[in-house]
Amino acid sequence: MKTLDVTGIPQLDAFQRELDEAWRGKQHAYFALLGLKAREAGSLHSRVEEGLSYAALERLQRVLDMPTSRLSEVLRIPARTLARRRSAKRLQPDESDRLVRLARLVGLTLRLFEGDVAEARRWLGTRQRSLGDRAPLEFASSEVGMREVENLIGRLEQGIPL
């Protein structure tokens, strides 16, 4: 497995350890990507229901190296609303749910590319024939689209022709 390049992300060693644990099956990678200490689905559900911190969004944004304007589009949160959430330091439950969905996609993509962040970022932004010639991040804005991207990743992991 390649080492994840976590340059510019706080607590680099802890982040790498969390991701290493995730890839060994001890937790979901997206928990680590969001900086969550939750280790089970029930705990994550409660955190989403109360609204995740804005810091979780910023952490994933650094991993993706994505401008706020683009992240706003992917998460379907208007830029002005995102600015208010930044001031409040907390997302609403529905926004938190979409953030977790995106983090799950990023975690699956990182696993597909064995921790190679640059390759995962590239793939997420590249048009895929099996997604109607659209990029995986374009599909991440809906649950149906997310499931299609997850299915595509599963097929790629299994070596199934597209």
Image: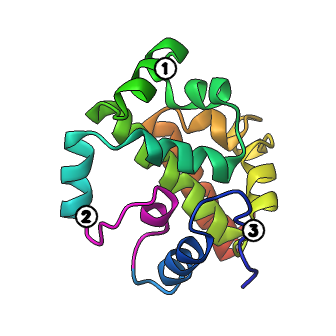
Which label was assigned to residue 5? 3
Q: Earlier in the sequence, mark 2 or mark 3?
A: 3
Q: x, y percentage for residue 133?
A: 77, 35
Whether residue 162 is visible here, answered yes or no, is no
Q: Distance between the residues labelled 2 and 3?
A: 27 Å
The residue that mark 2 highlights is: 41
The mark closer to the camera, 2 or 1, is 1
Please, what secondary structure does the residue beneath circle 2 have? helix
Whether residue 17 is visible here, answered yes or no, is yes
The residue that mark 1 highlights is: 83
Amino acid at the residue labelled 1: Ala
Q: Which one is nearer the viewer's eye here, 63 or 14? A: 14
Amino acid at the residue labelled 3: Asp
> Where 108 sits versus 39, above or below?
above
36 in magenta: yes
Residue 107 in the figure: left or right of residue 114:
left
Q: x, y percentage for residue 101?
A: 44, 47
Quarter of the image that includes the C terminus: bottom right
Q: Which one is nearer the viewer's eye here, 126 or 156? A: 126
Residue 161 in the figure: left or right of residue 47:
right
Please, what secondary structure does the residue beneath circle 1 have? helix
Q: Earlier in the sequence, mark 3 or mark 1?
A: 3
| Residue drawn at point x = 30 percent, y = 30 percent | 92
Quarter of the image that includes the N terminus: bottom right
4 in magenta: no
The answer to the question of whether label 3 and label 1 lie on touching residues, with beta carbons closer than 8 A, is no
Q: How far apart are marks 2 and 1 (CA)?
A: 29 Å
Q: Give the range drawn in magenta.
A: 27-40
The answer to the question of whether label 2 and label 3 lie on touching residues, with beta carbons closer than 8 A, is no
| Residue drawn at point x = 34 percent, y = 35 percent | 90
